[in-house]
Image (tube, rainbow, N blue to C red):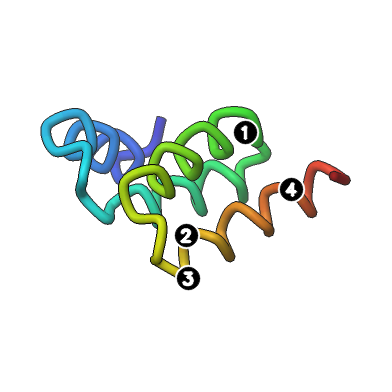
Amino acid sequence: MTDHVRVWSDELARDPSSLVFLPLAETLRRRGQLDVARKVAVRGIERHPHNPDAHDQLARIHADAGD
C-alpha cells in the first residue's frame, strides 16, 4: 500500500464524509483494484450524491471493469 493510499484510507476511516474518497478511488482504479475502488466510490456517492466528480469516478471504474 502506498503512503498516499494509507493516509487517505486512515482519513476516510476517521471522517467518512471526507472528499478524500475521490483520490483514493482513483488511485485504486489505476492500480487495478476495481472492486475496492467501486466500494469506495459508492460509499462516497452515498454521502455526496450531488458531487459530479464522484459520479465521474464511478463511471470510470465501471468502464475499466467493462461494465
User: Label 1 vs label 3: CA separation?
Assistant: 22 Å
Q: Can you tell which mark lies on residue 33?
A: 1
Judging by the rendered image, the residue that carries numbered circle 2 is 54
* Mark 2 Cα-neighbour bin, 10 Å: few <14, some 14–19, many ≥20: many
Report the mark closest to the observer, 1 or 4: 4
Q: Secondary structure at mark 2?
A: helix
Q: Residue at x 12, y 31 (%)?
A: 14
- Mark 2 and mark 4: Cα distance apart in space: 13 Å
- Which of disc 4 and disc 3 is earlier in sequence? 3
Residue that carries the numbered disc 3 in the rendered image: 52
Label 4 Cα crowd, 10 Å radius (few <14 / some 14-19 / many 20+):
some
Which corner quadrant of the image does residue 44 belong to?
top left
Looking at the figure, which quarter contains the C terminus? Answer: top right
- At numbered mark 1, what does the secondary structure look like: helix, strand or loop? loop
Q: Are marks 3 and 2 in contact (CB under 8 Å)?
A: yes
Q: Identify residue for label 4.
A: 62
Q: Nearer the viewer, mark 1 or mark 2?
A: 2
Point out residue 25 in the picture as x, y percentages from the top left corner: 48, 47
Q: Secondary structure at mark 4?
A: helix
Looking at the image, tell me whether mark 1 or mark 2 is earlier in sequence order: 1
Q: Name the residue type under label 4.
A: His
